[in-house]
Amino acid sequence: MMNCHRVISYNGRCLISVQCHLHKVSHEGDLFRPAFLLRNLFYLYDRVATLNLTTREMILLTQPKLKSGLRKLPLAETLQRYHDELIHPADKKRFVAFFDLKTLKARVEKAKMNSIAEAFRSIAADGSLVWKTHRVARMASSTQDIFFCVVRVSDAQDIMQYGQALGIRQYTLMPENIPVHAVYG
């Protein structure tokens, strides 16, 4: 693992600090360490976060290639930014309904396996569209309403199911950007 950051820039030159850490998995016991497991979650999920309805905070587990760690963010603002920047205009209303913080707890508790899932067309870094499944499940907590949220690229089976349910035949961006302003909270 390597961490780099610029210390100072002057006259077109900069001083960079580089920290290198060599981690070796020497035996099977290392496979069960929490840090190893967390790093490898990103082979399955694009985003991993907790949603705390009590404190109105999101804790986002950041991807190792960006800089691993946890980031605490305001819940409503983070959902709004995700909605505005990454969700296809035709799926924005469904996204708002899925992440309705006033009804989330009741919907998850009512669900068969105490989790709910929905797929939305998401705008990838290169501008292409990708179906991504968002799953929210309750985390055991005696004093706060905390939910675990994961996002992954949808399976072909998921895509067919949502496409049929919504009557969607084409998965391209619409030429106009339809503004949908969501209110979370």
Image: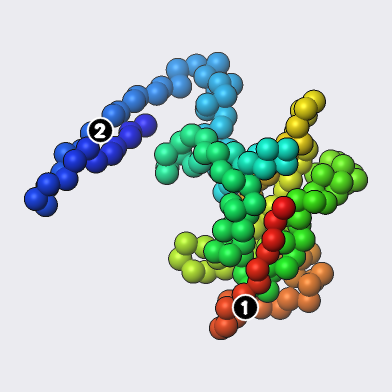
Secondary-structure class at tag 1 = loop
What residue appears at the point 59 percent right and 52 percent down from the top-left corner? 78
**Number of numbered callouts drawn:** 2
What residue appears at the point 57 percent right and 78 percent down from the top-left corner? 177
Q: Is residue 109 above or below residue 156?
A: above
Q: Mark 2 vs mark 1: which is more N-terminal? A: 2
Which amino acid type corresponds to the residue marked 2 in the rendered image? Val
User: Is residue 75 shown left or right of residue 10?
Assistant: right
Q: Return the residue nearer the eye: 81 or 54.
A: 54
Secondary-structure class at tag 2 = strand
User: Of all residues shown, which one is farthest toward the left?
Assistant: 11
What residue appears at the point 58 percent right and 21 percent down from the top-left corner? 32
Q: What residue sits right under mark 2 in the picture?
A: 18
User: Callout 2 environment at 10 Å: few (<14), some (14 to 19), or many (20+)?
Assistant: few
Q: Coloring scheme of the render?
A: rainbow
Q: Residue 111 placed where, x, y %?
A: 88, 46
Which amino acid type corresponds to the residue marked 1 in the rendered image? Ile
**How far apart are labels 2 and 1 at the CA level?**
44 Å
Q: Residue 71 placed where, x, y %?
A: 52, 39
Residue 42 position by quadrant: top right
What residue appears at the point 58 percent right and 65 percent down from the top-left corner? 84
User: Callout 1 environment at 10 Å: few (<14), some (14 to 19), or many (20+)?
Assistant: few
> Is residue 33 visible in this depiction of the protein?
yes
User: Is residue 50 shown left or right of residue 6?
Assistant: right
Any mark on residue 178, and which?
Answer: 1
Q: Residue 129 placed where, x, y %?
A: 57, 68
